[in-house]
Image (cartoon, rainbow, N blue to C red):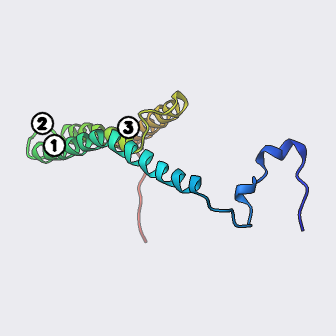
Amino acid sequence: MDLCVPNFLSPLAMSASHSHSPAPQDASHENHGAHDQAAEAAHIAAHLGAYIKVGVGLLVLTGITVGLSYVDFGSRSMNIIVGMIVATIKASMVAAIFMHLKGEKMTIWRFLIMTGIFAMGLFFLTFLAHSDPITGTSYSTH
């Protein structure tokens, strides 16, 4: 039983190559598969240098993080802030290269920036609540 597709949906209709009947195999189809593999290999080779650089950068920054854990920056809060700065740099490298955000459209970056601002606002509110607790409340367990 076939259903009719309205005209305005015709570009979305399945083409003959997606039908359930087997498509004939010919030499051009086999060459197309070889071309896909060659194009994929070229794509990987083009990005391999960036992947290796980011991997080495992550290893170096992990070493820096471990080294900084032995340095006292005056207070526990400053130690955490320095550690978070290094972690943010590492996360940015992963997002930009491994998650391919480096070449994304500006809309994605706007959403990412707004999400970061919102998260920092939530962290700031938590900090405010922790540094200035509501006085006069007591909690007792019975």
> Where's residue 19, x and y in %?
74, 61
SS under mark 3:
helix
Given residues 40 and 112, the one toward you in this image is 40
Residue annotated with mark 2: 74
Looking at the image, tell me whether mark 2 or mark 1 is earlier in sequence order.
Answer: 1
Residue lying at 41% horizontally and 68% vertically, measured from the top left: 141
> Where's residue 93, x and y in %?
31, 39
Circle 2 residues within 10 Å: few <14, some 14–19, many ≥20:
few
Looking at the image, tell me whether mark 3 or mark 1 is earlier in sequence order.
Answer: 1
SS under mark 1:
helix
Q: Quick check: marks 3 and 1 in contact, CB under 8 Å?
A: no
Residue annotated with mark 1: 60
Q: CA gap, disc 2 to disc 1?
A: 24 Å
Eyeballing the image, is 111 above or below 11?
above
Give the amino acid at mark 1: Val
Q: Quick check: marks 2 and 1 in contact, CB under 8 Å?
A: no
Residue annotated with mark 3: 96
Give the amino acid at mark 3: Ala
Q: Nearer the viewer, mark 2 or mark 1?
A: 1
Question: What is the quadrant of the C terminus in the image?
Answer: bottom left
Given residues 58 and 33, the one toward you in this image is 33
Q: CA gap, disc 3 to disc 1?
A: 17 Å
Residue 27 visible, this angle: yes
Question: What is the quadrant of the N terminus in the image?
Answer: bottom right
